[in-house]
Image: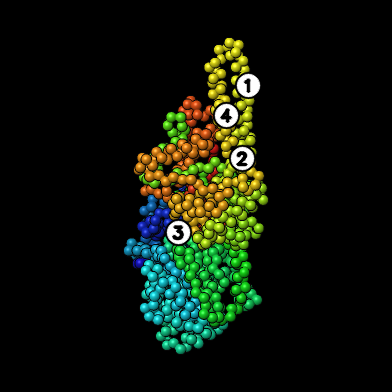
Amino acid sequence: MNITFPELSLVILMGPSASGKSTFAQKHFLPTEILSSDHFRAVLSNDAYDQSVSAEAFELLHTVIEIRLKRGLLTVVDATNLRVSDREGLKNIAKKYHAFPVAIIFDLDEKVCQERNRDRGERAIRDSVIRSQHLQMRNSLKRLDKESFRYVFTLRSEADVDSATVVRQRLWNNRKDERGPFDIIGDVHGCRSELNSLLLKLGYHFESDDSAIAPKGRKAIFLGDLVDRGPDTPGVLRLVMNMVEQGQAICVPGNHDIKLVRKLRGKAVKVNHGLADSLEQLALEPSSFKERVMAFVDGLVSHHVLDEGRLVVAHAGLKESMQGRGSGEVRSFALYGETEGEIDQFGLPVRLDWAADYRGKAMVVYGHTPVPETEWFNHTVNVDTGCVFGGKLTALRYPEREFVSVSAERVYCEPVRPFKSTELKLASVSAQLRDDAVLDFQDFSGKILIKTRTRSNVYIQEEQSSVALEHLSRFAIDPRWLIYLPPTMAPTQASDHEGYLEYPSDAFTYYKRREVKRVICEEKHMGSRAILIVCRDNAVVRARFGINTDEIGICYTRTGRRFFRDRGLESSFLLRTQQALTKSGFWEQHATDWVCLDAELMPWSLKAEGTIMKQYAAVGSSATIALNTSISAMTQGLARGLPLKEELGHERCRAALVDDYIKAYQGYCWNVKSITDIRCAPFHVMATEGRTYFDKTHEWHLATIAGICAADPEILTATRFLPVNLDEPQDVLRAIDWWKKITATGGEGMVVKALDFVPQRLKGRIQPAIKVRGPDYLRIIYGPEYSLEQNLVRLRKRNVELKHHLALSEFALGLEALQRFVMREPLRSVHQCIVGILGLESGSIDPRL
């Protein structure tokens, strides 16, 4: 016997003890797929036959079944399952998770079971028990056809059991192996002329009037509602049916399509909502065409799961729990959406907004309810833009996430419910932004696994996410601004170069060993890291970020705090930056109305004044007083003939080091009285509308930013840089000399980066940047006397591996956050990465690194 059932099923083995159920299961299913009541008894009592724990064992069995079916895993229940109540509970679980209930009945002769039972030795049960079970099964079989099993297979002999084969049938909606690219087209409603125009715009060509060929490698997907209301329902059907038959398209049914077929079959349906138009047009077609239409619609599957589960298409959308499942409830949802059973003032069903609660990983593309404009919402999008009502016919190009539309040639039908009245509201604040205004704690609590495009998986422990959430709730800016946080930057390994703790050659060696031949050296400004988001006007702030404010942007720190305490100074700074962007033509060049820049803001004292006064200035002041007192006393003692010459020289050396220390931090401080006292050095164009710039080289970034800085050199500073070919010794020597000149004149040092923004290698990841700091700056960090040889020996033992690992993880998370934002993913998805960065920063690591 060939036992065939869908790949997502709850297989219920049914039969007396010793009928061969367990042996059959072990032969045809994976060990992990088989859930045995005996196993759960053993788990709870160490005895598989301890009937005293049967109730608890079956409770545990049902729990595991639910978990497996929820995850979409075929499950086999190995128990007698002879009572109706037992089977009813299992079928209810299958129904809950839209899995097919399958019964495999072991109806073997009682004598066979008795003989097998006796061969079990100590595991044998009484003959009377098997006899009773056989009677139970006989009674069950009489009414099994009323128990709504979708598939029933009966094995009546040992030969049947031995010869049986099990075939798992792929679900009709499972097209995961089809990866696209696709052109997903919204509700057509008989608008054949507009459909032709849209297909041509998408690059399709017509071999004949009713046959369109897709561009190489692409395929069209029609989201249903091909019929009703429009002028040419037969033409639309003919074209779509031909495209599907030729493998040029996929189609799912719409509620209008189903209703039309029911009417063609003579069912009693109400002729409204454009059905009369379709019937009138089809009356002119031969009966063979109508038969073809009925067969075509009957063969359509409620929804499809494509591209390894990344894409789901359904006429009215689909909740995550229903994707890739098959049931009447799933089909109803895919056709009509989720309704309350009530009718609105226009006589239409009141539909629940399932997309507002959607948290699935798959992108869901749907239609059904006309909208004036497409709008991403929780990784879903409605592409029914009301062509038949005078709107547009729209397609989504996948995976490009690009919308392509053609306008309706005219209004073919007045909508029952006005759909253009919300246009201004949508243009102001999108549904996604309204939904993002309140974030759910559950989305960020506990251990978090974050998948990134540049570093596979990053794990954030529960204690790390807790610290991050505490920080966000107490100190951070409005979270709707937080679309990016920059990573920590790793230092070079400790150098064995005499007199130095960090030296450029060590950074060059790091990259060369990893087969990076071209790097770029950028001057490291001694300021504070700042993220700038600047918009063309505050209308953009409301429309893109959902923040109702008069601000045109924000400047925040790498921990998400507002950079400026003086709001007036911040407003002036952002306005000057916005004007420079406008003057340089940035908005037009990049087709955007907002930008995110990574920058350094100076002076250092602008943000770190408190730290400088309490930490660095306090050290300098107290050390100066103490050493001056010591030197004065030793000088007097030496004058009296005491042998203090060597000690006095040592103290004077220490005093000179303290003077160097004070000069070092003072060089990075100045008073800020107005906007002209600020210097900003942007070095990365992180993102604009619809795209990031991680595919550009660092030279491109610096050249692009130099154009912006030239528009306002009074406050914007272009970063000096030097390209280096590591295979050219002269290039390397020139870069080292350049670093020495920078640090000799008070500069902090330089940052060495691979030329590519995201450096790659065959194995492992490469640091995006390595900082090489000069002696004066390191004196601030490690203390006045760090450069003494005995201290350098100790400091060279520092371990930078954890810092390197942290930098890679934070870099990946920062880029991922921006990628998600520009792709208009929900803010919770973006903030998962932000929480990750803040969580990683909460770890214990030497802050001097």
Q: What is the number of the mark on residue 659?
A: 4
616 w.r.t. 273: above or below: above
Give the colour scheme of this rendering. Answer: rainbow
Which mark is first along the chain, 1 or 4?
A: 1
Location of the N terminus (image quadrant): bottom left
Q: What separation in Å lies between label 4 and label 1 (alpha carbons)? A: 15 Å
Q: What is the number of the mark on residue 670?
A: 2
Which mark is first along the chain, 1 or 3?
A: 3
Dot 4: what SS? helix
Q: What separation in Å lies between label 2 and label 4 (alpha carbons)? A: 18 Å
Which mark is first along the chain, 4 or 2?
A: 4
Which mark is first along the chain, 4 or 3?
A: 3
Q: Which residue is mark 3?
A: 73
Measured from the top left, where is residue 513 in percent x and y? 37, 41
Measured from the top left, where is residue 637 in percent x and y? 60, 14
Q: Mark 2 or 1, which is nearer the eye?
A: 2
Measured from the top left, where is residue 502 in percent x and y? 46, 35
Residue at 43% across / 71% down in the picture?
A: 202
Asked whether residue 219 appears in the rendered view, the answer is yes
Q: What separation in Å lies between label 2 and label 1 (alpha carbons)? A: 29 Å
Residue at 42% across / 84% down in the picture?
A: 289
In the rendered structure, are the residues bearing label 2 and label 4 in contact, judged by CB atoms less than 8 Å apart?
A: no
Q: Is residue 220 left or right of residue 591?
A: left
In the rendered structure, are the residues bearing label 3 and label 4 in contact, judged by CB atoms less than 8 Å apart?
A: no
Q: Mark 3 or 2, which is nearer the eye?
A: 2
Q: Nearer the viewer, residue 686 or 835?
A: 686
Q: Which residue is mark 1?
A: 629
Q: What separation in Å lies between label 3 and label 4 (alpha carbons)? A: 71 Å
Q: Residues within 10 Å of mark 4 (few under 14, many from 20)?
A: some
In the rendered structure, are the residues bearing label 3 and label 1 in contact, judged by CB atoms less than 8 Å apart?
A: no
